[in-house]
Amino acid sequence: MLNVACIQPEIFQNKHKCYLEIEDLLKKLLEDNNNCEIVCLPERWIPYTREKAQNLQKERGQDYHFIQKLAGEYGINFISGAIWEKRSSYKKPFITSYFFNKNGEEIGRQDKIHLYSYERKYFESSFTLNIFKLKKFNFAILICFDMAFFETPRLASENKAEILFSPTQIRDSGLFNWDIYLKARALENRIPIVAANTYGDFINRKFSGKSKIISFQPEHYSPSLLKVIEAPYSSNGYIYDEIDVQFANKLRRQRLNEKVEKSEIKINIFSQ
């Protein structure tokens, strides 16, 4: 079993207030669920301005150290959400998510692979998918748009990932599609998904949260039945669940064994 949580803080215009909000929600989460083992933040949890340069951090900058400090002080494994950071050897910055262990030590980071819309102009895309380990379980971090393409969750699932964490920034108008993406990725790979979404209003865009923890109802093999826990709509908060990773592993082994490789499928094209 793995005890997981999403924190869905409100984004304020004052960064220090955002920090206080996250720490306050973390305290409440751990008071109610003291066996929680890992927490995931959304893709965006600090203020945003139209001046792109003002939204960037230096590599391992202030936001990095804030999350690192929380992980160590509260003894909790932490996925940092996404940080926009500049790196000296690259022309463009990266959108990256850090994984800290409960001692506040950086274990690694995952850069965003699929860049969305305007992001392709301003950011570097990653071509590396990392698999992390927590206890005896393996997991991957897929940042937002990485969930919109079946290849990345499938690649993670085929390379020993047993759970997917997804820091996300989905505006209100995209929640319906996002819900379908997440459930489809969970079902097609038989893999639990922990997806933390942004909550707040900035630059005429509304982000309404509804973070999700998606796993499977125990002992339902065929058909597999999803278990979905959602955070509040248009409010701050958190969600927590205990995920039976080993049961999901049984489902996934069965599902992947049923897959016919694309290379084995012949394509016939008929014309009149």
Image (tube, rainbow, N blue to C red):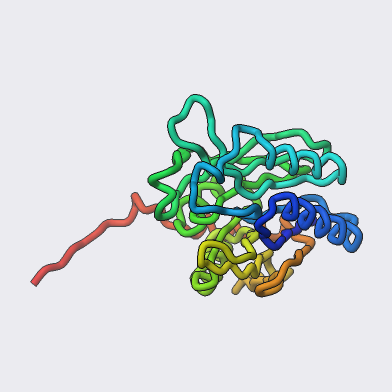
- Looking at the picture, how far across and down is residue 161, in whole percent? 62, 47
Residue 3 placed where, x, y %? 80, 56
Task: Give the image location of residue 47, x and y in percent.
Answer: 62, 54
User: Compared to 185, does 146 lie above or below?
Assistant: above
Please, which residue is most extreme toward the top here?
89
Say whether residue 14 is left or right of residue 268: right
Name the quarter where the N terminus is drawn. Answer: bottom right
Q: Residue at x 55, y 47 (%)?
A: 156
Quarter holding residue 253: bottom right
Residue 100 vs residue 246, the one in the foreground = 100
Residue 166 visible within the image: no
Residue closer to the observer: 31 or 147: 31
Q: Residue at x 49, y 46 (%)?
A: 52
**Residue beneath the point at 68% across and 42% down:** 63
Residue 102 falls in image quadrant = top right
Horizontal side of residue 270 vs 230, given as left or right: left
x and y percentages locating residue 261 in the rendered image = 40, 52
Quadrant housing residue 44: bottom right
Q: Is residue 132 visible?
A: yes
